[in-house]
Image: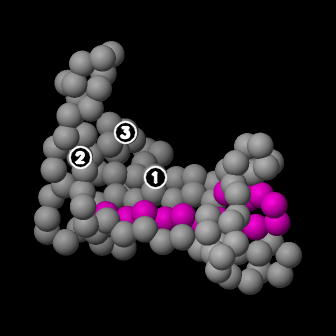
Amino acid sequence: MLHDGEVYKFATYTGANIRSISAWSQWAEDATTDAAAAHAARAKQLGLLGFAEFKVSGSGHTMHVRAEVPDDGSLPAFLYAPVNGTMVKKVREALNGKIWVRLVDDADGRV
């Protein structure tokens, strides 16, 4: 990550670790399981068709990343994806998503 002219590296060779990760989409194959129910309720409350978020820590900083697909009336397009070398699986892709990235200093909590 480049911030104010400084590069912050989050990689296995720097000792970075994924601290948390969660995702949900109404089109996911497991979108109706009990485990997805809390994510579905949260997405509906926020007016989203789907979201993904994760936190990665390393070198004294934590990077927070959140991506959202809003429920704004437009539907994501179907794209073909590979399965065992053939393009047969259909996945949804949207161009109206938003991404937020936040870098936090672990020592003092500064953003």
Whether 1 is among the magenta residues is no
- Residue at the image position 46 percent from the left and 52 percent from the top: 23
Dominant secondary structure (helix, strand or loop) of the stretch shown in magenta: strand
Residue at 33% from the left image edge and 16% from the top image edge? 84
Image quadrant in which the C terminus is located: bottom right
- Residue bearing the label numbered 1: 23
- Of the pair 41 and 2, the residue shown nearer to us: 2
The tag on residue 30 is 3
Is residue 68 shown left or right of residue 81?
Answer: right
Q: Nearer the viewer, mark 1 or mark 3?
A: 1
Disc 3 on helix, strand or loop? loop
At x 30% / y 17%, what residue is drawn? 85
Residue 28 lies in quadrant: top left
- Mark 1 and mark 2 lie on one chain; the one further toward the N terminus is 1
Magenta span of residues? 56-69
The answer to which image quadrant residue 110 occupies is: bottom right
Residue type at tag 1: Ala
The circle on residue 92 is 2
